[in-house]
Structure formats: C-alpha cells, structure tokens
Image: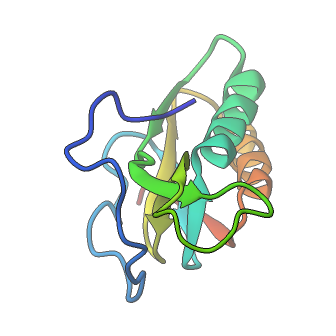
Amino acid sequence: MLTPRRVKFRKWHRGRTKGVDNRANQLAFGSYGLKAMDTKWVTARQIEAARRSIIRFLRKGGKVWLRVFPDKPVTSKGPETPMGGGKGAVSHYVFPMRPGRIIFEVEGIPEEQALDALGQAGSKLPIKTKIVKRV
C-alpha cells in the first residue's frame, strides 16, 4: 500500500477540504483519465484497490499513471479508551480529494478497454468520478 517513507510531522490536524482542485485537473500523461467529482478523504487502501483493478484489466498492454498520493495521516484511539492520554496513533493515510482532480491516467490501449478499466476503478472509490478523454 501507499505510505510515505519519511514524514516531517507524524500527526496532522484534520483541516478543511473545500473548493475545486486547480492542480492536476488536466490530462498530462495518458489519453484517458479518471476525474474526481466529489470532496472526500480517499484512503490508501481504496486507491490501491482501484489501481489493482485497472492493472488486472490491462493485463500486459498499456500504461497507468497514478496522480495522487496519500500522505495525510489519520489517527485513531483504541475502542473503549477513556478521555485524555493524548492523540491516538497513526492508523492509516488518506488523500483529501477535491472535485476536478485527475486520479488515474491510462495510455496504450483501445478506447473501449480504457473506458471499462476506468469505470471499474471508479466503482472502487467512495466518490463520484468521470472518465475524461484527451481532445
């Protein structure tokens, strides 16, 4: 799974995820892409599940680019833990997704196959997605 090798700060504040993403909102590498249409934290497991579904669909042909990386740590305390005792341990990492962000790009396969692969990957994610094509 995707996790950062080293981090400057082990635990982060939750913060706000609002607005539209103005970076990585155009296709840069492939001919087809999967674009986010919602705001939500997407976990490393969900990104990996979507990536695997694309890879399995492509078999040997084609190339996939991942345009997001989960580097935001999410902490949680154990169940039935009393109040106090500080912030919990880091349990997993997420990527705060905003509308307009390209998540995956695909190149080197027929259009029909690319649309199927990206559609399948989109169903693995907790957000609404749209398949975009290079003009």
Asked if residue 113 lies left or right of residue 25, the reply is: right
Q: Position of residue 74 (x, y in %)?
A: 51, 57
Q: Quadrant of the C terminus?
A: bottom left
- Residue 67 in view (yes/no): yes
Which residue is found at the position 72% from the left and 38% from the top? 49
Which residue is found at the position 37% from the left and 54% from the top? 27
* Placement of 113 over or under 27, stated as above or below: above
Asked if residue 53 lies left or right of residue 60, the reply is: right
Report which quarter residue 23 is drawn in: bottom left
Asked if residue 73 lies left or right of residue 127, the reply is: left
- Residue 111 in view (yes/no): no
Report which quarter residue 41 is drawn in: bottom right
Q: Quadrant of the N terminus?
A: top right
- Between 124 and 9, the one nearer to me in the picture: 9
Asked if residue 21 lies left or right of residue 97, the reply is: left
- Between 88 and 16, the one nearer to me in the picture: 88
Which residue is found at the position 46% from the left and 39% from the top? 66
Number of marks in the rendered image? 0
Give the residue furthest to the left: 8
* Placement of 80 over or under 22, stated as above or below: above
Which residue is found at the position 45% from the left and 35% from the top? 3
- Between 23 and 7, the one nearer to me in the picture: 7
* Placement of 29 over or under 16, stated as above or below: above
